[in-house]
Amino acid sequence: MVARLTPAWRTNLNDALAWGIFPLLFAAHGLTIGQIGLLAALYPAVWGLGQIATGWWSDRIGRKDLITAGMLLQAVAIALVAAGTTLPVWAAAQVLLGAGTALVYPTLLAVIGDVAHPAWRARAVGVYRLWRDGGFAVGALLAGVLADAYGLTTAIWAVAALTAAAGLLVAVRMYETHPRS
């Protein structure tokens, strides 16, 4: 059960990283408050607008490929933040992170709708949300402990690795829950 839910908490682990650790990294590299605000806004803007299309898209082509691609794209974006040192690189990374999250976020919830019987669907969504939202706490603690012990960049690389591992786990273990139309 936990292996199937890992992508759920990992999604919000990335959010905790993006909203907690990234601004500290950007400030440490001398960015202004305005530049940090711009970077912080790019991720949810792309995510929010993108999921309008990706939710519909997952109904057309299925769930697994979008979830896998989204997680791997998130991992690349997070790694780009860790490797980057300039505003344009970080802006591109934030856009990629938003696109990856747009692929994953509505699609994971759609999987619950695909597999849960209507009689227990609300309960299943509640359990999913518990695991997903627990990622904020796990992410904040994990990233904070790693950042304190080894530095901001190491914490970011660690989350990139976890995100890539979750994407590969989905590619190997998840079955398609929605037949292609």
Image (cartoon, rainbow, N blue to C red):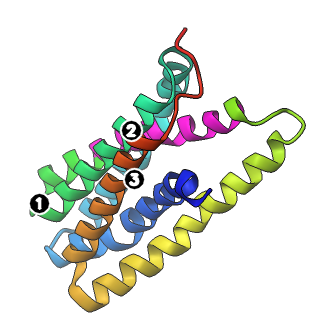
SS for dot 1: loop
Q: Secondary structure at mark 3?
A: helix
Q: Amino acid at mark 3?
A: Ala
Which residue sits at x=30%, y=90%? 148
From this viewpoint, is residue 112 visible? yes
Q: Is residue 77 left or right of residue 176?
A: left
**Residue at point 18%, 68% (across, down):** 31
**Lower position in the chain sequence, tag 1 or tag 3:** 1
Cα distance between the residues tagged 1 and 3: 23 Å
Does 83 appear above or below 70?
A: below
What percent of the width, then of the height, locates residue 10? 47, 59
Q: Which residue is mark 1?
A: 84
Amino acid beneath label 1: Gly
Which of pointers 3 and 2 lies earlier in the amino acid sequence?
A: 2
Q: Nearer the viewer, residue 144 or 33?
A: 144
Check disc 2 and give the amino acid type: Thr
List the single residue furthest toward the top: 181
Q: Quadrant of residue 120?
A: top right
- In this rendering, the answer to whether 55 lies above or below 131 is above
- Quadrant housing residue 15: bottom left
Frontmost residue, 100 versus 43 = 100
The local crowd at label 1, few if under 14, some if 14 to 19, many if 20 or more residues have their Cα within 10 Å, is: some
* Residue 47 seen in the current view: no
| Distance between mark 3 and mark 2 Cα atoms | 8 Å
Magenta span: predominant SS is helix
| Residue 173 numbered mark, or none | none
Q: Residue 166: give its label.
A: 3
What residue is disc 2 on? 68
Locate residue 90, reporting x and y percent: 19, 55
Name the spot of residue 42 as percent of width and height, x first: 34, 47
Residue 89 versus residue 123: which sits nearer the camera?
A: 123
